[in-house]
Image (tube, rainbow, N blue to C red):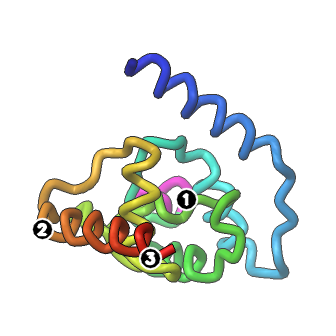
Amino acid sequence: MEDSVSSRQQKLHALLGSVSVRWPPSKSFMQAAWAAIREVRPGETTTYGALARRCQRPNASRAVGRAMRENHVCLFLPCHRVVGASWALTGFGPGLWRKAWLLRHEQAAIPVRQPQYVESVQATFLKREREV
């Protein structure tokens, strides 16, 4: 079972990675952050600080956060895979419940420090699914 999940994650990563994303006009650091987030595979998470280090700017975690906030193509630039320094689920424009859902869907490890939050996210998602 785990192999099939891994295989699907690899196929999804390859498919989304093959799509050419036209960057909106922005600063070169934002483009570097967006390129770095495309390297984070489904089922994985990283921190804002780790992305900043990948961009050769180790003290620029807030700038990475700004770049993620300016991301308007979340499917191709998966900013939901970025978590806080304490591995907490933080900032996601469409809502943290969606971030948690996407991470669960990709079978990423969700921070253990937030079990109550994850449970409330699941309840909210199930309620919204029933309403649709």
User: What secondary structure is the stretch in magenta mostly built from?
Assistant: helix
For residue 51: magenta? Answer: yes
Residue 54 visible here: yes
- Which range is magenta? 50-56
Residue 19 image point, x, y percent: 82, 48
Q: Do callouts 1 and 2 mark residues in contact (Cβ within 8 Å)?
A: no
Q: Is residue 55 left or right of residue 118?
A: right
Which tag, 3 or 1, sits closer to the chain's start? 1
What distance separates the C-alpha of mark 3 from that of mark 1?
46 Å
Amino acid residing under circle 1 = Gln
Q: Amino acid at mark 3?
A: Glu
Res 56 label: 1
Tell me which residue sits at (74%, 72%) in the image: 28
Q: CA distance from mark 3 to mark 2?
A: 23 Å
Q: Which circle marks residue 131 in the picture?
A: 3
> How far across and down, in percent of the image, does residue 51 sit?
49, 59
Q: Which mark is residue 116?
A: 2
